[in-house]
């Protein structure tokens, strides 16, 4: 369903076409314009069919010869040109650096192309919408975090990297996981977790070896690089993806963003979301089954409010199993951390909880 | 000057001796006690001789048979026992997990060993002071972040890891860099930088290959794992360490913490600080020389205040070069980001700035 990586040539063609179209308009003496899909909540909807957040069909035209439009028009074209050069030279740059690269005065004037990073950030988002390419495909990178281990060999920038031989550290997941090649994938599934400390434990226990899986952690929300990596491991390598978080509204939302996409990045859902991801806990039933009740942490207002918000999301409200889960959490008025398992022994999670879950295929969808 | 890693046996001996001493006191019918150095600013001082922050000689005794002491006494002993088991079984655990592992009720009573993580955190700090072992040496890990690349081969947990073959990601730096073995170190020096995006650029440019160095980044403050790694690369492998940050008070403080240690971790300075680290910019003179003036970012109050604080630190106030630098920054009333170099071309920093600095040995000490 989701696309595989558009290759470099396709991406350059897309950007070249954008320029050619403008050139044609100008040659014909027309007022050149770019068609930009409308962003923002008003144009974001949940697609029942695709099971992801998507942008609606609203578009607007941005004209060069329009005092209200010209600045954004020029900035979008400038980013497109920069991005084409990046792809041509196979270099990548950060959001902050794009700002500095476009910060110049238009010759013969006192007008700067950009004054502020918010302008380039917006121009980049617009270019994503116009070209249907992600920031990463445009060679503009996001913040990164996280590590991976497992029986997988990749090739990246000419290096062969064996994720099963990374010691205590793991391979640091880059901002862009768009262009790594999978050379050998012996692992059978993926566990993504929100906490690096849990990953460290599973790595030290060599859980990924025992269960024959890939383990991936960020620290909090999954980065774009991780989300794209999960998607590629699923669609290209057919590895089921399981999400492991605390029993709390924030953990549930981390799962939600991986699975359905996020509101802010609705336009990029097809390249980032993974509706086939499943949740492997913590769930209310686990608290019962593994006797974690003494480790309940009472909700603060902020937790209760977040849970209420999540309950109201379109993509959850027809899902009976999840609504039941939310209600159980609401009734408990408390959360539980994955770390609570260590009270039962340092390796309880890798030796009991995870194998149990996998054996019973006890996942929430 | 700084110690190399105490080996496992030494660490176990230290903990066993702690227990044996208590046992002896009890056998003799004495009230058992532990001697704990006093923490806190009142007992922190800057050592002119060692050029690091250290703890003074103040100590206090913590008795078992003392209603005000007994809880902390028991918690410290409980952490010592847990830590010995961790080292014995060659496992590591996080601060949060230590709390869960010690959260139990004392048999025959309704009293819990710990109620809150702040209690175990403090007990761990006390144990560090009592044993003169760092948290990492006690197998209790801190948060981690960051990546490394360069012509170095290490062995870690049975894996041979070549930092020069890590693609776009790098090797993810673990919480504990205490036990990695350096197998082959061809790189000649280390550049540590605060920004992952700068690291990504230097890595993509293969700057570490061209300059034959190791590049290390965190995101913001260097983690304990990174600080220990820098220290080991310097003391054990004789690689000079250069710190690369923005021209702003926060960047200067990142350098300060790496070099002199931090107030909160003064007791661990000897195992974390690196007084031989040097600063390779950004400096006020670089703004002149590389014509970065258009990229000055005006100070906010918070920046000006932070600068004032740093100027007042004991370890800077007799350093003429640094005081001059602080005064220049104060006069400019502005900061400049490393990213500003990208305005001169994406690879300007790797192709011009860094080689220039290294050639002219233009470092602040």
Image (cartoon, coloured by chain):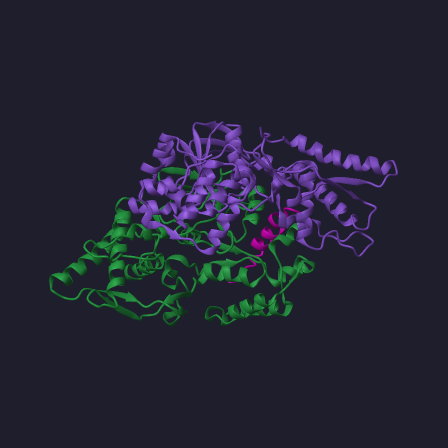
Chain colours: A green, B purple
The magenta span reads A343-365
Q: Look at the image and tell me in which quarter the N terminus of chain A lies.
A: bottom left
- Give whichever of A345, A71 is nearer the camera: A71
The answer to whether residue A4 is magenta is no
| Residue extending farthest right | B29
Give the dominant element type of the magenta stretch: helix, strand or loop. helix
**Residue visible at 40% across and 46% down?**
B197
Visible residue check, residue A150? no
**Residue visible at 43% across and 62% down?**
A261
- Give whichever of A47, B87 is nearer the camera: B87
The answer to whether residue A362 is magenta is yes
From the viewer's perspective, tell me whether residue B43 is left or right of residue A244: right
When the figure is inspected, residue B135 is found, relative to residue A132, above or below; the finding is above
Provide residue B267's location: percent of width, then percent of height: 63, 39
Provide residue A301's location: percent of width, then percent of height: 59, 68
Provide residue A166's location: percent of width, then percent of height: 49, 38
Visible residue check, residue B169? yes
């Amino acid at each position: 369903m989701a696309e595989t990586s558009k290759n470099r040539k396709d991406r350059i063609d897309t950007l070249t076409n954008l320029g050619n179209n403008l050139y044609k308009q100008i040659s014909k003496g027309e007022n050149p314009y770019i068609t930009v899909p409308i962003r923002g909540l008003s144009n974001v909807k949940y697609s029942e069919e695709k099971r992801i957040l998507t942008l609606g069909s609203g578009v607007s035209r941005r004209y060069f010869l329009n005092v209200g439009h010209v600045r954004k028009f020029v900035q979008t074209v400038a980013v497109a040109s920069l991005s084409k050069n990046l792809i041509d030279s196979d270099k990548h740059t950060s959001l902050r650096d794009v700002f500095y690269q476009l910060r110049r005065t238009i010759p013969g004037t006192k007008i700067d192309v950009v004054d502020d990073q918010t302008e380039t950030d917006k121009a980049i988002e617009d270019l994503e919408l116009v070209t249907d390419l992600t920031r990463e495909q445009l060679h503009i990178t996001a913040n990164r975090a996280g590590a991976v281990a497992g029986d997988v060999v990749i090739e990246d920038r000419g290096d062969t990297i064996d994720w099963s031989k990374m010691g205590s550290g793991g391979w640091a997941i880059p901002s862009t996981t768009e262009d790594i090649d999978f050379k050998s994938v012996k692992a059978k599934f993926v566990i993504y977790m929100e906490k690096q400390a849990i990953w460290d434990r599973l790595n030290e226990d060599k859980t990924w070896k025992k269960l024959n899986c890939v383990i991936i952690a960020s620290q909090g929300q999954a980065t774009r690089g991780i989300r794209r990596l999960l998607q590629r491991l699923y669609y290209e390598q057919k590895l089921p993806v399981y999400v492991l978080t605390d029993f709390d509204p924030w953990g549930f939302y981390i799962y939600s963003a991986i699975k359905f996409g996020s509101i802010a990045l609705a336009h990029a859902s097809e390249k980032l979301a993974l509706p086939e991801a499943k949740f492997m806990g913590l769930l209310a039933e686990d608290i019962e089954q593994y006797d974690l009740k003494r480790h309940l942490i009472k909700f603060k207002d902020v937790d209760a409010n977040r849970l209420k918000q999540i309950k109201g999301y379109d993509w959850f409200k027809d899902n009976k199993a999840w609504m039941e889960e939310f209600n159980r959490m609401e009734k408990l008025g408390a959360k539980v951390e994955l770390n609570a398992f260590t009270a039962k022994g340092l390796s309880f999670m890798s030796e009991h909880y995870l194998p149990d879950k996998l054996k019973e295929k006890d996942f929430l969808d």
